[in-house]
Image (cartoon, helix red, strand yellow):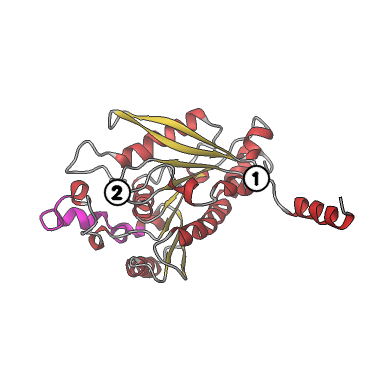
Amino acid sequence: MNPVRAFWLILMLIASPAWAFQSRVVTIPSAAMNRSFDATVVLPDQYMRGNTAARFPVVYVLHGSGGDYTDWTTNSNIGKLADRYHMILVMPDGGHESWYIDSPVDPSSRYETYVGTEVVAYIDQHFRTIATKRARAITGLSMGGFGALRIALDRPDVFGAAGSISGAVDPRGSEDEPGIEQVFGDPSRDADFWSSEAIVADAQDFGREHIALTIDCGVNDSLVQSNRLLHERLVELGVPHDYAERPGGHTWKYWSNAVKYQVLFFAGAFRRAVRAANGATI
């Protein structure tokens, strides 16, 4: 081989990180809904090759409306973040239009209980997690952004950090979304419920429960105004949080970039819990 070419090849190999994360599909039963759902679990390389006694923080990443448990790994390079930040990523199935709530009008749709309780219990039982709220975060895109914030607010003893990417943070702005009335009810007749589920209604609880919070939305996204209103309310209440608007719309190009910043934020929030669990860096 030409020596110059060999030199550049070696340099590229040294400069390029070797991503060795492992993706698995697991089936997680739901007693609340009397059925099972698949979920994608991404394990960092350190999980397989490092100290077998080491335990890892977990980020739960929710898909949007019409999506499923494969969306994030199919449409982004999210797996690399597991290796980079030494954490487990879990992408559960939240149904096409569940909004990740326990529906008051459809008793068979109990996705908040499933994701917020049953999935977490399964992951803690089957993987080497740091099973404390300070080592758990939840985020998601669009419908999943709403779901992540709603679940964190309703289960502050489970999640110590939460995020939203292009989140539909107020369902009252999504009345025309196909299928939403099947879980929220009629927007006029059940208006009180719709209002109570808006994230802004409980914004003060992020501060009260000391939930580390990060929110972002594209400036060309139709949901940006409701995210701005939530941000303004959090500022008014004095609730610490990160908020960002970046160029982009309601697209995978935006989401696959935004999730990198969210996971970096969570890695910082996890630092103390990871040190306490493992005594040193993994």
Q: Quadrant of residue 51?
A: top right
Residue name at image x 86 percent, y 50 percent: 1
**Numbered tag placed on residue 99 in the rendering:** 2
Q: Secondary structure at mark 1?
A: loop
Residue stretch in magenta: 185-204
Residue name at image x 22 percent, y 58 percent: 195
> Marks 1 and 2, how far apart in space?
33 Å
Which one is in front, 28 or 169? 28
48 left or right of 70 in image: right
- Label 1, on which residue? 19
> Does residue 57 show up magenta in the picture?
no
Mark 1, other Cα within 10 Å: few <14 / some 14–19 / many ≥20 = some
Which one is in front, 235 or 255? 255
Which one is in front, 95 or 89? 95
Q: Amino acid at mark 1?
A: Trp
- Indicate which disc, 1 or 2, sits on the residue closer to the N terminus: 1
Q: Is residue 159 above or below residue 131?
A: below
User: In the rendering, at what x and y percent does residue 198 appear?
Assistant: 28, 58
Residue reaching furthest to the left: 189
